[in-house]
Image (cartoon, rainbow, N blue to C red):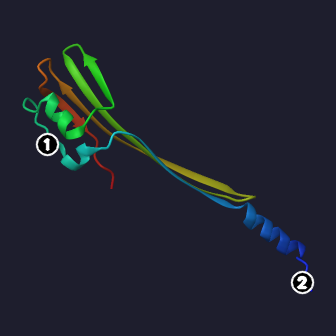
Amino acid sequence: MGRALRPAGFAILLLVALAGCIHSDSARGVEPRWEELGPDAFVRGSTTRSEVLERLGPPSQILSLAEGTAFYYLLETTRARGVILVLYNDRGERTRYSRAVFFFDDQGTLTDFAVSRPEE
């Protein structure tokens, strides 16, 4: 005949059955091509709006300014990890932002720009 499960064994089995892990990754925005190209790929006073579009694709936002326009690129990535137990729960989340902004005069020439540094 089979052995009956003792109360302690049943409790351990129940805890294991109710335990779980959390793992999720998400990304929103545009691919950060500016990180691959580096800041030397863009020259103030020389690079055009069309060249930025060709190299980076459509921006997350186009801003109309008093004297020209700005392209704003953003990628937001979030990674969550955790464990769920009956008596203890732990969850950690890390969000990383990659940004680039390019300013153009009324003729479409790059006047200034800034890019975030890639995280290691």
Categorize mark 2 by other alpha carbons within 10 Å: few (<14), some (14-19), many (20+). few
Residue 30 at x, y percent in the picture:
34, 39
* Three-letter residue code for mark 1: Ala
Residue lying furthest bottom in this view? 1
Q: In the picture shown, does residue 83 fall above or below 50?
A: below
Q: In the picture shown, does residue 7 fall above or below 31?
A: below
Question: What residue lies at 33% left-to-right and 51% top-to-bottom?
Answer: 119
Answer with the quarter of the image where residue 16 lies: bottom right
Categorize mark 1 by other alpha carbons within 10 Å: few (<14), some (14-19), many (20+). few
Residue 5 at x, y percent in the picture:
88, 76
Assign a secondary structure to mark 2: loop
| Label annotation for residue 108 | none
| Label annotation for residue 41 | 1
In the picture, measured across the screen, residue 40 lies left or right of residue 6, that is left
Residue 45 at x, y percent in the picture:
8, 29
Q: In the picture shown, does residue 71 fall above or below 10?
A: above
* Quadrant into which the N terminus falls: bottom right
Foreground residue, 109 or 44? 109
| Label annotation for residue 2 | 2
